[in-house]
Image (cartoon, rainbow, N blue to C red):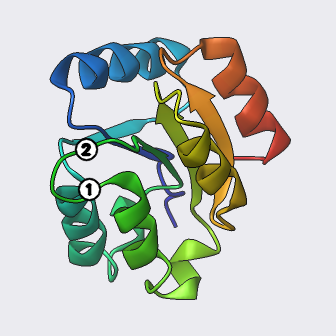
């Protein structure tokens, strides 16, 4: 049996941030697969489309908070309704440039969020987090 590729799902409406952060992850070689979504809605769609194909599901999600239409918190509200077979195996970290104390508190209080990371993504911080949670 083939072992599952380690996959990260990056959700951010900012195309530049997506490119920069995906490049950092690519250089790190921490994941074999990087899936980019420019909206929370497309991130959820990707997950829903692959719920029956575990090899395509992410092990880790980096989620922006401030996005139009559906923000990161709306995503998390929908995320918690996904099957626990998936959510128990997939870790979520917020990757945001927000300085809003309310957003920061809300992110840290969410049971699905393991950490709030500040943009830009720092390789050492990502590596330390993945080691800590054995991703």
* The one of 50 and 122 positioned closer to us in this rendering: 122
* The one of 75 and 124 positioned closer to us in this rendering: 75
Does residue 121 lie above or below 37 as drawn? Answer: above
Using a 10 Å C-alpha cutoff, classify the residue at mark 2 as few (fewer than 14 neighbours), some (14 to 19) or many (20 or more). some
How far from the left and from the top, in percent, is residue 6? Answer: 51, 46
* The one of 50 and 55 positioned closer to us in this rendering: 50
Q: Mark number for residue 67? A: 2
* The one of 87 and 111 positioned closer to us in this rendering: 111
Label 1 belongs to which residue?
40
Residue occupying image coordinates x 26% and y 77%: 48
How far from the left and from the top, in percent, is residue 18? Answer: 28, 25
**Mark 2 → mark 1, Cα distance in angstroms:** 8 Å
Q: Is mark 1 on a helix, strand or loop?
A: helix
Left or right: where 28 falls relative to 63 = right
Identify the mark nearer the N-term, 2 or 1: 1
Residue occupying image coordinates x 64% and y 63%: 110
Looking at the rendered image, the disc whose residue lies closer to the viewer, 2 or 1, is 2
Using a 10 Å C-alpha cutoff, classify the residue at mark 1 as few (fewer than 14 neighbours), some (14 to 19) or many (20 or more). many
What count of labels does the image hold? 2
Left or right: where 124 falls relative to 44 = right
Asked if the residue at tag 1 contacts the one at tag 2, i.e. Cβ–Cβ closer than 8 Å, the answer is: yes
How far from the left and from the top, in percent, is residue 127? Answer: 70, 25
Residue occupying image coordinates x 44% and y 56%: 58
């Amino acid at each position: 049996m083939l072992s599952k590729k380690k996959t990260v799902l990056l959700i951010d409406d900012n195309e530049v941030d997506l490119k920069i952060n995906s490049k950092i992850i690519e250089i790190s070689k921490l994941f074999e697969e990087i899936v980019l979504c420019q909206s929370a809605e497309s991130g959820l769609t990707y997950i829903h489309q692959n719920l029956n194909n575990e090899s395509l599901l992410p092990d880790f999600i980096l989620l922006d908070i401030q996005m139009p239409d559906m923000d990161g918190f709306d995503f998390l509200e929908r995320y918690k309704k996904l099957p626990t077979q998936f959510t128990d195996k997939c870790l979520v970290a917020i990757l945001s440039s927000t300085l809003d104390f309310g957003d920061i508190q809300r992110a840290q209080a969410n049971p699905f969020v393991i950490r709030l990371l500040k943009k830009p993504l720092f390789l050492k911080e990502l590596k330390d987090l993945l080691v800590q949670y054995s991703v």
